Image (cartoon, rainbow, N blue to C red):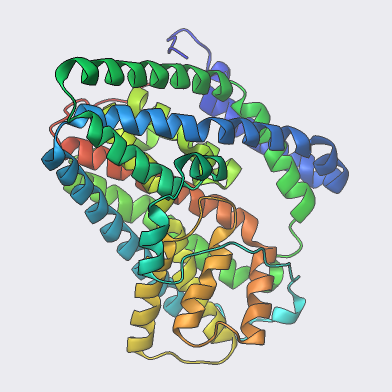
Amino acid sequence: MEYDPSLPWYRRLHWQVLAAMGLGAATGAIFGAPAAEALGWIGDLFMKLLRMIIVPLVLTSIVSGVASVGGGKAIGRLFSKTMAYYVVSSFLAAMTGLLMVNLIRPGRNADMGAAAQSEIPEINTPDSPTELLLDIVPNNFIEAAGAGDMLAIIFFCIVFGAAITTLPEKPRTIVTDIFNSFFQAMMALTSGIIKFLPIGVFALIVAMVGETGFDRFAALAKYFATIGSGLTIHLFITLPLLLFVVGRIKPLVHFANMREPLLTAFSTSSSGATLPVTIKTLREKVGVSNKVSSFVLPMGATVNMDGTAIFECAGALFITQVLGIDLSIGQQAIVVLTALLASIGAAAVPSAGVVVIFIVLNAIGLGSNPEAIMIVGAMLAIDRPLDMYRTAVNVFSDSCGAAIIARSEGEEGVDTEVRH
């Protein structure tokens, strides 16, 4: 949607989404479960529309982007920068979680009996780095695409795009033009779906508030505040510092250009579902080239989970505090390292971090502790708003990485102004 300077403020998408969130929260709070049941299907339909375009968008975006990068050295350089940013940002996130849980100590005297328990969903995660590496290479790309296995899809697209760069000029140009054309078609489809973003957000918020309510938060208020403060510090201090110091980018400009993806991430609780909006915004508003955005963003939505790293580190230590276990500095270092690695294996779907936290608990010998499992169930009961917030942090971290890497690649139009 092109920007029209004469367009009134209430016709602009980010204001419409904010209004939809407020109206949805009020509707869910007033009418409760009946409203959630009556309107929830609209949110589900919107989520299905977003998920419908993820695989073809990632496929065409990565292949066309990698094909435009050039030879193997250029791809290797881009990959090295991307992974370096992911490791640094996730480590800083985990350390923030560690700091806040030790300062606030939310597990001390926590009344877990008053917290509602929820059934813990099953999500398969790799048990070791070797298994993660083997999972990256698909046995069948079509099967991986059908299952939405993003790591396998990304791997295939990168090596396929690299293979295109080795072709003679004529077939290379033909194949690249075909994928570029498909990518433009997918971006047009994405733009059409995003026009319905306020309606989808309204329905999703109604369902969340109508089903969850606000009565479960009292027993876990300090835990909620601990995770929330950690996410806030990372979102408004750590990541802006990385933007300013490393990328020489004005954080306020980047925040302004990233309004729609942040609101979408908060509403959907899914980095994967937000990916189409993020890709579109990075290209059209932030000013990152397809070469960089197509490489950094799909991988980031899968492996760069800063908000999840904060949650897993602080959540695991919260559980030990509730159980009356004091961890040494060395044991806390193991928690940080495991949280960093476990966040890579967290699926880009709602509340996946609650399940992946068992990887961190296993590292300190609490993975099968029945009391620890009970506490995780109580944490899940109030996890939805926290999951919404940490998803926004995850998406913003991906966008910061793409902007910083684009600047390092010599792209000069990145966040030079607020673009509507």
Q: Nearer the viewer, residue 177 or 15?
A: 177
Looking at the image, residue 366 lies above or below residue 255: below
Q: Quadrant of residue 402?
A: top left
Residue at the right extreme?
A: 34
Q: Is residue 123 something one can see in this rendering?
A: yes
Q: Residue at x 57, y 55 (%)?
A: 387
Q: Nearer the viewer, residue 9 or 32?
A: 32
Q: Residue at x 56, y 63 (%)?
A: 124
Q: Quadrant of residue 282?
A: top left
Q: Residue at x 33, y 88 (%)?
A: 330
Q: Position of residue 63 (x, y in %)?
A: 32, 31
Q: Is residue 251 something one can see in this rendering?
A: no
Q: How many marks?
A: 0
Q: Nearer the viewer, residue 9 or 134?
A: 134
Q: Tell me: 198 left or right of 353.
A: right
Looking at the image, residue 121 lies above or below residue 275: below
Q: Position of residue 175 (x, y in %)?
A: 30, 20
Q: Tell me: 217 left or right of 13.
A: right
Q: Position of residue 36 (x, y in %)?
A: 80, 43
Q: Position of residue 184 (x, y in %)?
A: 40, 17
Q: Quadrant of the C terminus?
A: top left
